[in-house]
Amino acid sequence: MSEQAHMARGRWSSRMAFILAATGSAVGLGNIWKFPYIAGENGGGAFVLVYLICIALIGIPIMMSEVMIGRRGRLSPINTMALLAKSEGANPRWKWLGVMGVVAGFLILSYYSVIAGWALYYVLEAGSGVFTQASPEKIKSVFDGMVGSPATLLFWHTVFMAMTMFVVARGVSQGLEKAVTTLMPGLFVILLGLLVYSFFEADFSRGVEFLFAADFSKLSGEAILTAMGHAFFTLSLGMGAIMIYGSYLPDDVSIAKTAVIVSVLDTAVALVAGLVIFPIVFANGLEAGAGPGLVFQTLPIAFGQMPGGVIIATLFFIMLVFAAWTSAISLIEPAVAWYGEKFGSSRTKAAVVTGFVTWLIGVGSALSFNVWGDPLLFGKNFFDLLDFLTANIMLPLGGLFIAIFAAWVMHRRTAREALEMRDGALFHLWHFLVRYVTPVAVLLIFLQAIGVIG
Ligand code: TRP
């Protein structure tokens, strides 16, 4: 590719920029909102251990595969898959793997934006002291009032989508890179500040015990599969987000090393988020296994009772917004890049069109919490259906095919060259994991998700 084409397409200015962007994608609602409550529901320690094993054996190898494929193709996931299938002499229909990824990105972002909108709303509620000394009933009514109001949800969904598309429209270096290099350090600072608070002011030791003391009797088969599914979601794998980020990666950066760094950072943020949330929850006499309401209902009760709670709560929800924002841009980037390639249009036009489509699907999710809450299919409403279809079916399926492509379709030599791994033993370990371990594990998640087993 010519120097000029590089500039037109965009590229991360450094290895650090890529690490922040990929970590920004990975660290999201999944780490701060979802991980703590699924760990809580599944008994803590033993679940956390299984999740860590999944990150190491499935997550890191697939992340390396996605970055490798992306950098080799240097196009949107759809055209990258088409290009590599051609150069490896494989079936041109591999392009549909890219198509599924782009579609999954639209669908995930459409509901992700609605939840991110809750976080925006809670920044204002927390900042104006609504939770201070509030009873659990009062806090529940704040939450119910928010999700019960179509206007409120649609307003904040719209604000969040506008924030996302504003960044994406400005392109890789002026938009994405600037956003992640500002927001991610902010996120880390807030998270560490909250950790210090939790350490000195809350019931830290009980939080540690809850997250790390492994009681295997509490570990069900379903919990193991939940841990695997979450490893995918939290690392942003299976739909081409990390692939497109890899397509902007300079040639001389080590893929193995950066994939390990990003995975470790993502895992650290999830664990530290747990170490912030659980000690605060326990110190205020509340329960850990609170389900999806942990962050939006249980935690605000604790914030309301503690000294300095207004500031701590506001910072917490700002951090949640930052995390969601840097993830959202990665969910839509594959579609924006593809739109530009297909129609030769500007990033602004691509962002407006793809953003509008996402916003429109999101309206269905926003209404699922109120006027359109009745089940549509399989006892699930629109929001639950989208969540199930994307997280439990499309991502594992995408991950499975990415693994198959990287380890069975691509020639071993091409893969090794694309990864630029000098260490033969490590390359063989990667190849073995992606060839055998990952596909079997992913197949298990998939079968569980569609109810064949477990
Ligand atoms: N990883 C993010 C989170 O934990 C969500 C996310 C961003 C994502 N991009 C993705 C999930 C791509 C799956 C695929 O919140």
Image (cartoon, rainbow, N blue to C red):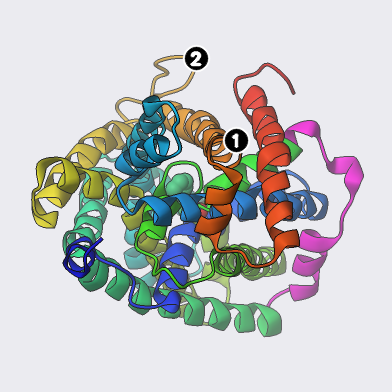
Q: Amino acid at mark 2?
A: Phe
Quadrant of the drawing holding the N terminus: bottom left
Is 194 above or below relative to 344? Answer: below
Quadrant of the drawing holding the C terminus: top right
Which secondary structure dominates the residues rendered in magenta? helix
Q: Where does residue 385 sit, x and y in percent of width and height?
A: 44, 26
Could you say which is closer to the camera, residue 196 or residue 9?
9
| Mark in the foreground, 2 or 1 | 1
Q: Are marks 2 and 1 in contact (CB under 8 Å)?
A: no
Q: Which mark is residue 378?
A: 2
Left or right: 270 with respect to 370? right
Real-space CA distance between mark 2 and mark 1, rounded to the nearest whole angstrom: 36 Å
Q: Where does residue 279 sit, x and y in percent of width and height?
A: 69, 69
Task: Verify whether residue 51 appears in magenta.
Answer: no
Residue at screen point 58% across, 50% down: 413
Q: Is any atom of residue 286 visible in this view?
A: no
Residue at screen point 47% across, 71% down: 19
For numbered disc 2, what is the local secondary structure?
loop
For numbered disc 1, what is the local secondary structure?
helix
Magenta stretch bounds = 202-223
The count of marks equals 2
Label 1 beta carbon within 8 A of ligand 1? no
Q: Amino acid at mark 1?
A: Trp
Q: Write down the residue under mark 1.
A: 408
